[in-house]
Image (tube, rainbow, N blue to C red):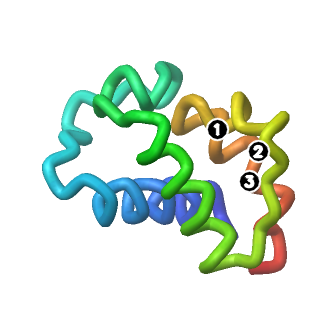
């Protein structure tokens, strides 16, 4: 998967969780939770959707790597290399 594909995947998952999420002014380097008003359950939904779609097992210790859009892409890129 390309970096753009991963970005689009994350955005699509968030849109499915919160159809009112506003991505117009999203800073890819700032925490998604703060910018999109995501709570801990929303965040877990993102992790679960990644597991469902791509069979990814993301350890809880790695959750901080999913804080921003850029960090999500950096973390997921090697995991989704052959997806």
Residue that appears at 14% across and 49% down: 20
Q: Which residue is mark 1?
A: 66
Labels 1 and 3 touching (C-beta < 8 A): no
Q: Residue at x 84, y 48 (%)?
A: 59
Mark linked to residue 33: none
The reply to whether dot 2 and dot 1 touch (C-beta < 8 Å) is yes
Image coordinates of residue 21 in percent, x first then y, are: 21, 45
Comes first in the chain, label 2 or label 1 = 1
Residue at 20 percent across and 37 percent down: it is 24
Quarter of the figure that contains the C terminus: bottom right
The residue carrying mark 2 is 75
Task: Find the residue positioned furthest to the front.
Answer: 41
Secondary structure type for disc 1: helix
Say whether marks 2 and 3 touch (CB < 8 Å). yes
Compared to residue 2, the image places residue 61 above or below, namely: above
Q: Secondary structure at mark 2?
A: helix
The numbered disc on residue 76 is 3
Q: How far apart are labels 2 and 1 at the CA level?
A: 7 Å
Residue 37 picture location, percent across and down:
29, 29
**Eyeballing the image, is 11 above or below 27?**
below
């Amino acid at each position: 998967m390309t970096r753009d594909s991963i970005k689009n995947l994350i955005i699509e998952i968030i849109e499915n969780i919160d159809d009112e999420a506003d991505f117009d002014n999203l800073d890819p380097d700032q925490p998604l939770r703060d910018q999109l008003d995501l709570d801990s359950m929303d965040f877990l939904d993102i992790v679960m959707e990644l597991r469902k779609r791509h069979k990814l097992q993301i350890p809880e210790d790695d959750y901080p790597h999913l804080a921003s859009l850029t960090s999500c892409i950096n973390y997921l890129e090697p995991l989704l290399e052959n997806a």
